[in-house]
């Protein structure tokens, strides 16, 4: 073996070792952050300057018509979801339970981003969903500032104002505390308020349809839809057990989901078709 070849192999090995070490350090840091137990009592946070929710007229799958004004006096969860989204399917049982437990104080509205009405109707019947489900329209999605990650849940107070937004899989225990706090019930949590500068809801939020470090510049509307569908249905392989979209939200420093997301955008931009394997539902809820 020549000296130059040996030096080349050593250099390549060194680069791979450094890259592997960097990945292990990142994984260790993420694991440590995930493992940290919160200190003190639980906290629920609401916007101190909430905006009114869009004044929608809702036609559910059963033909019932509801307006947002009809729901004043109740806490409302507006849940954007799809049957092809694993985290969405994973949280449905918790939403059903919350609706049953707080039926006098809570109204959940499921807004499906599916294209197949029959598939949604079959799924609603199969799961025994006990709250109205609506098929999303572009106008409805735009009215809420755009929805990139599924599931996305908007929390409305009893005055019909948007006080919180959760991207990704809900933590049912945390959501129960939010409902109790907003409904004026006893709750084992401290309530804090923050000024909403667009992180919850804003009619003028220009990047509401984007995920962290996912560049959709130059894509057509249909291409963006294809990218977001893939990112919300394909699993990340970094070990987080989340979809690519959820991983980008949960940890913006993750190099794995960032690289795969960039590949997805490139494939859609160039018209390369990729048929993902069915994604398994996450094993548990993530914190909000």
Image: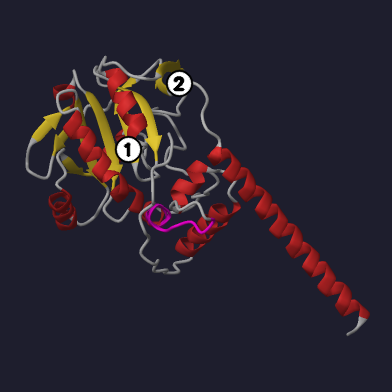
| Badge nearest the viewer, 2 or 1 | 2
Image quarter in which the C terminus is found? top left
In the image, is residue 229 part of the stretch drawn in magenta? yes
Q: Where is residue 239 in the image (x, y as percent from the top left)?
A: 52, 55
Q: Horizontally, is 101 left or right of 164 in the view?
A: left
In this picture, is 279 found above or below 101? Answer: below
Q: Mark 2 points at which residue?
A: 41
Splitting the image into 4 quarters, where does residue 181 fall? top left
User: Is 93 one of the magenta-colored residues?
Assistant: no
Task: Give the x, y percent position of residue 90.
Answer: 31, 48
Residue displayed at 14% across by 47% down: 128
The magenta stretch is 227-238
Q: Where in the figure is residue 267, as x and y percent of width and height?
A: 48, 64
Q: In this view, does 277 lie to the left or right of 138?
A: right
Count residues near mark 1 (Cα–Cα under 10 Å), then give few for <14, some for 14-19, many for 20+: some
Q: Is residue 139 visible?
A: no
User: Between marks 2 and 1, how big is the CA–CA gap?
Assistant: 36 Å
Eyeballing the image, is 131 above or below 45?
below
83 left or right of 247 in image: left
* Towards the viewer: 55 or 156: 156
Q: Circle 2 — which element?
A: loop
- Residue where numbered disc 1 is placed: 142
Above or below for 86 versus 203: below
Quarter of the image where one finds residue 256: bottom right
Could you tell me which quadrant the N terminus lies in?
bottom right
Numbered label attached to residue 5: none
């Amino acid at each position: 073996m020549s000296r130059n070849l040996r030096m080349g192999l050593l250099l390549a090995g060194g680069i791979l070792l450094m890259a592997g070490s960097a990945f292990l350090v990142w994984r260790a840091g993420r694991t440590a952050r995930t493992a940290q137990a919160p200190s003190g009592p639980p906290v629920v946070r609401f916007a101190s300057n909430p905006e009114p929710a869009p004044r929608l007229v809702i036609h559910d799958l059963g033909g019932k018509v509801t307006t947002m004004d009809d729901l004043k006096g109740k806490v409302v969860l507006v849940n954007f979801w799809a049957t092809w989204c694993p985290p969405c399917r994973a949280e449905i049982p918790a939403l059903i339970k919350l609706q049953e437990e707080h039926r006098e104080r809570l109204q959940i509205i499921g807004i499906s981003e599916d294209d197949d009405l029959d598939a949604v109707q079959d799924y609603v019947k199969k799961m025994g969903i006990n709250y109205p489900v609506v098929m999303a329209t572009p106008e409805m999605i735009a009215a809420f500032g755009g929805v990139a990650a599924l599931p996305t849940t908007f929390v409305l107070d009893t005055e019909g104002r948007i006080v919180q937004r959760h991207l990704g899989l809900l933590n049912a225990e945390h959501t129960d505390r939010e409902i109790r706090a907003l409904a004026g019930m006893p709750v084992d949590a401290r309530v804090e308020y923050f000024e909403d500068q667009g992180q919850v809801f804003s009619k003028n939020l220009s990047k509401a349809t984007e995920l962290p470090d996912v560049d959709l510049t130059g894509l057509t509307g249909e291409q963006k839809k294809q990218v977001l569908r893939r990112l919300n249905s394909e699993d990340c392989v970094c070990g987080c057990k989340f979809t690519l979209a959820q991983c980008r939200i949960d940890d913006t420093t993750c190099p794995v989901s960032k690289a795969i997301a960039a590949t997805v955008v490139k494939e859609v931009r160039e018209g390369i078709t990729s048929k993902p394997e069915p994604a398994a539902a996450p094993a548990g809820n993530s914190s909000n």
